[in-house]
Amino acid sequence: MPYEPPTHTVERSLRATTGAKIIAGVDEVGRGAWAGPVTVCAAVTGLRRPPDGLTDSKLISPKRRTELAAVLEKWVTAHAVGHSSPEEIDALGMTAALRLAAVRALEALPVRPDAVILDGKHDYLGQPWKVRTVIKGDQSCVAVAAASVIAKVRRDAMMAELEHGSEELAAYAFSANAGYPSPVHKAALAERGPSPYHRLSWIYLDALPQWAHLKKTRISAEAAALESGGQLGFDF
C-alpha cells in the first residue's frame, strides 16, 4: 500500500515562525515492550530531499528498514541515539525514562538543535527544549521519519544481539519480537520467569502468579497511570 512521503512542512513552519535553523526530529521505539530499553533517536536532516521509501518505520518491512537505515545514517546531517534501561524505566516510570533517553540522544548530537519535532501529542521533553509535537510525525515529517527508522533498526539489533551465545535468552525470541509480547515470549515468561532484561514494574507480571513476587513498584501512582495505556502495545 503506497503512503504519502514525508515532507519538510513542519520544519519550514518552525523556521519561519521561530527563526530556528537547526531542527531535530525525535522518535522513540520500545515504549510498549516488556523487555529491553526504550530507545530514542534524534535526527537532523536539513531541507534536502529524503531517500525514496522513507516513512514510519512500522510501515516498512524489516529487510527494507535495515537497508534504509544504512542509507539514512549517511544521508542525515547528524543523528544520535539514546537509551533508558529496564532498570531506569522501573525506577522512573516511562515518561521520565523517555525524557532521559531523548535528552541523551539530543545532547549526543554534534550540534544543539534550536527546535525539536517530537512524534505524538505529548511533550515528554519540556524545558529547556523548544518542542513542536506532531501526531503521526513519523509519517509526515522527514526528520522524524528518519529518526523512527534509525531508532527501530538500532533497538531491534540490540535485542537480537542478546540471544547470541545465550540459550536462556534465546527462549524469549528477542530477535523475532524485540521484547514485545509475542506468543513465544509469553510462553517463555510463564516457564522461566523474567530475565535480567525484563521490565519488572510492568503489569504482565500480574498474570504470572509464580513470578509476581519479583514485581517492582514504581515511584508513584501518578507515574504508573501515565504509561498504563502504553504497556501492552505491539510494535513489530
Image (cartoon, grey):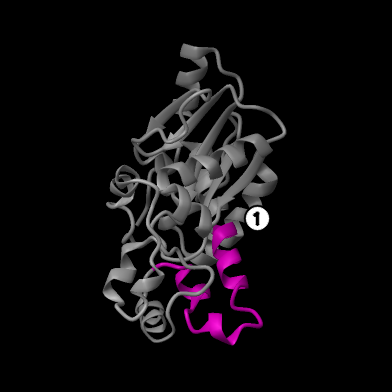
Q: Residue at x 42, y 56 (%)?
A: 58
- Residue 222: x and y, percent? 30, 42
Q: How many marks?
A: 1
Magenta residues span: 153-180
Q: Nearer the viewer, residue 204 or 181?
A: 204
**Secondary element type, mark 1:** helix
In this rendering, would 46 be left or right of 3? right
Q: Is residue 47 above or below residue 4?
A: above
Vertical placement of residue 2 versus 197, above or below: above
- The residue located at (37%, 57%) in the rendering is 217
Q: Which residue is found at the position 50% from the left and 13% from the top?
A: 18
Q: Which residue is mark 1?
A: 70
Q: Quadrant of the N terminus?
A: bottom left
Q: Determine if the magenta segment contains residue 136.
A: no
Q: Is residue 151 visible?
A: yes
Amino acid beneath label 1: Ala
Across and down, in percent, residue 183 comes to 34, 79
Identify the residue at image location x=64%, y=41%: 79
The secondary structure that most of the magenta stretch takes on is: helix
Q: Residues within 10 Å of mark 1 (few under 14, many from 20)?
A: few
Q: Which quarter of the picture shows residue 138?
A: top left
Q: Is residue 91 above or below residue 125?
A: below
